[in-house]
Amino acid sequence: MSAAPPAGGSPAAPPAPSHSWTVKVREAAVEALPPETVLPDGQPTYVASWIYLFGVASIASLIVTVVSGSILAVKGPNWWHQTGPGHFFNSIHLWSVELFFFVMVVHLWGKYWMAAWRGGRMRVWVTGAIVFLVAVPTAFTGYLSQQNFDSQWISTQSKDAINSTGLGSFFNVLNFGQMYGWHVLLLPVAVIILVAAHVLLVRNHGVVPPFELHERRELAGGDGRAASVPEAHS
């Protein structure tokens, strides 16, 4: 039963805005990322195309990379070099990284040719491109953290190139502790944050639709005449 209107028949005044910062943050978050878009119960039919699978494959391979890398970081170099389980998780980590870069590059090029920045999705495209740029030094520091001949060779060969840019004063590729810290903490955290922002932006703006086919013709019969096919809509 609704409350009676105030005397004079005038409608009730709207509630005063809250001065609580937590309420303001909550309202801004819900306005920017509505729950029905962040966690939808359906997707457009064109998402079933194979080209849209590489984004999910990138996330799946990234999860395997983070989990296997966390196990390696806890156990240490002696474990991943001298024990059977260490060799296994080291291989899992390596091949999950290889898969991550493969599917991410295919995803990046696929969205480039689809012009995935259409419809106000520029931030979606930019965050995805930045993820790739940050993932490259993450993998590079991983090679430097192997503690074997490969890492020694890579570090000595890249030392002069890094020093020539002036970055060698605070990015010493011959310093295992520094490279290990970049690889297991700083750069992976940046990749995870960027991927999370990328996924939230995709949820907020929606998956980019394919280009519409304005004209598509095919030969009909043997008379050489062309018959138009109905336009495909997303």
Image (cartoon, grey):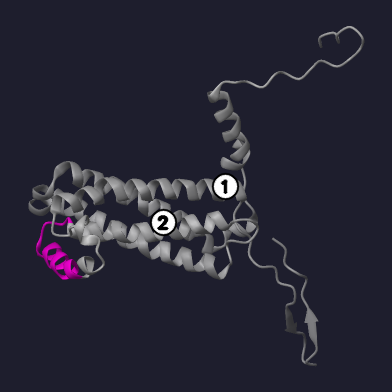
Q: Which residue occupies 59% across, 55% down?
A: 207
Q: Is residue 157 magenta?
A: yes
Residue type at mark 1 is Arg
* Numbered tag placed on residue 203 in the rendering: 1
Against 227, is 137 above or below? above
Image quadrant in which you'd find residue 169:
bottom left
- Verify CB contact (< 8 Å) between mark 1 and mark 2: no
Segment tinted magenta in the rendering:
145-160
Work out whether residue 213 or residue 161 is closer to the camera in this orientation and state it: 161
Q: Which residue occupies 59% across, 34% down?
A: 28
Residue 154 x/y as whole percent: 17, 67
Q: Which residue occupies 34% across, 61% down?
A: 99
Q: Magenta region, mostly helix, strand or loop?
A: helix
Q: Which residue lies furthest to the right in this view?
A: 8
Work out whether residue 5 or residue 229 is closer to the camera in this orientation and state it: 5
Against 52, is 30 above or below? above
Q: Does the magenta stretch include residue 88?
A: no
- Quadrant where the N terminus sits is top right
> Of helix, strand and loop, which one carries label 2?
helix
Residue 88 x/y as whole percent: 19, 53
